Image (cartoon, rainbow, N blue to C red):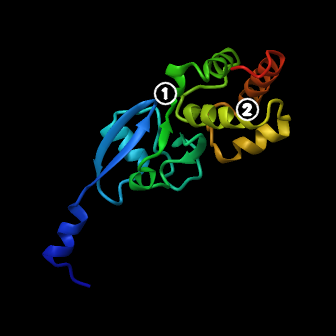
Amino acid sequence: MSFDEDSMNETDETVLVRFVVNGRKVACEVTPRETLVDCLRNALELTGTHAGCEMGACGACLVQLDGRAVHSCLMFAVQADGARIDTIEGLTESGAIADLQAEFHRRNALQCGFCTAGMLINAQELLSQAARPSREAIRDALSGNYCRCTGYEAIIDAIDAVARARSEAGGAP
């Protein structure tokens, strides 16, 4: 297979994509094969979303896309054109996960912090779908998030405590 100059130029073309990221309208020039995680980190400087395994297995790249947790390493930025994206920075700024963050801290459910953003995004999605998930349901929801520092019991304890507190408070975060 040989490459000619025309085929090389096609890979350099960019596409304008528009999203609402953390409540703000943004536009980015991306190549068609640029992943959403790379766009968020490089173009928008939202570095709380991590590129871990780049295969959708570790959960470090999770963001909310139109309210659902997605692996941003498995999605091209062009696929998210027109979407609403919430990153860990946006969920933090809005206060939506303040109780989860406080409980993770209180229970030492974070150490190096690399997996924490994905864990929090996954936990937030779980708690938005089930007010009082069982510990088994929490484990199942976290099965796509890898943590090499803490084990998982402190993380499960933190999510369970927040679920109980939110349930007692009527479901409010």
SS type, badge 1: helix
Q: Residue furthest left?
A: 5
Residue 73 located left or right of residue 41 = right
**For residue 162, above or below residue 135:** above
Residue type, numbered disc 2? Leu
Identify the residue at image location x=62%, y=20%: 101
Quadrant in the picture for the C terminus = top right
Using the image, tell me which numbered label, if any, was put on residue 127.
2
Q: Nearer the viewer, residue 8 or 114?
A: 8
**For residue 14, above or below residue 122:** below
Disc 2 and disc 1: Cα gap in Å?
A: 18 Å
**For residue 3, above or below residue 149:** below
Quadrant in the picture for the N terminus = bottom left
Q: Which residue is mark 1?
A: 90
SS type, badge 2: helix
Which numbered disc flags the more N-terminal residue, 2 or 1?
1
Q: Indicate the position of residue 24 as horizontal and vertical percent values.
A: 40, 30
Identify the residue at image location x=43%, y=45%: 37
Q: Indicate the position of residue 99 as horizontal and vertical percent values.
A: 66, 18
Residue type, numbered disc 1? Gly
Q: Residue furthest bottom?
A: 1
Q: Indicate the position of residue 133 as horizontal and vertical percent values.
A: 82, 34
